[in-house]
Amino acid sequence: MRKLVLLMACGVLAGCDYTVPLVPSPQMNIDPALIGLWQRTMPDKQTESLVVLPLGRQEYLVAFPAATTNTMFARACLGRAADKTLVQLEWIGNGQGKTVEDGRAYQFAAYAVASNALTVRMLNPDVVSKDVKTSSALAAAIAANKDQPNLFKEELVYRKVTE
């Protein structure tokens, strides 16, 4: 499975982490600071792009990696667990028309926006089991592990593209 940003990777839409949402339906308004084109330079000097657009007052459309033949698309919303605001990503398909095949369509990320930097850390399925069966069990597992230093994977830092 490839890393995702915010945001977030589901390696060709097979093998995302979770089968259940944390938030069954969006309840929180979007954070306007997330909207835009974000990029980071990979260790191999390639540029990786992430696009976050509003789908309404409570949802986003995420494209990652943007502008490639394998761009993946997700609906995203904000939710709360263990006193943290998380982004819930529901991967719906890619630019080649492929959809999620194994039911594991969800990923979750902690994020921070400061100045022109977006920092994203994906929830670690080695700490919070991929096999939780309900939204409440997922929230409880996050809460039970909230003090674990590896609750989230390594941070990814993107810079906002402004023109």
Image (spheres, rainbow, N blue to C red):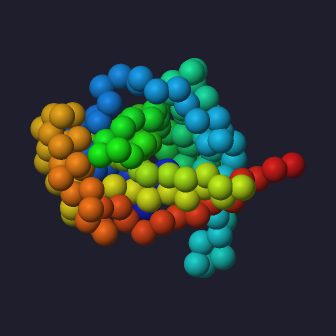
Q: Nearer the viewer, residue 5 or 120?
A: 120
Q: Position of residue 27 (x, y in %)?
A: 41, 23
Q: Quadrant of the N terminus?
A: bottom left
Q: Would you say 139 lies left or right of 78 here?
A: left
Q: Nearer the viewer, residue 105 or 94?
A: 105
Q: Is residue 47 above or below residue 57?
A: below
In terms of image quadrants, where is residue 2?
bottom left
Residue 65 in sight here: no
Q: Would you say 133 lies left or right of 69 here?
A: left
Residue 144 in sight here: yes
Residue at image position (54%, 49%) is 64
Q: Would you say 12 lies left or right of 14 here?
A: right
Q: Position of residue 98 (x, y in %)?
A: 41, 39
Q: Nearer the viewer, residue 16 or 79?
A: 79
Q: Position of residue 110 (x, y in %)?
A: 44, 52
Q: Is residue 34 above or below residue 75?
A: below
Residue at image position (52%, 64%) is 156
Q: Position of residue 132 (x, y in %)?
A: 14, 44
Residue at image position (48%, 66%) is 155
Residue at image position (87%, 49%) is 163
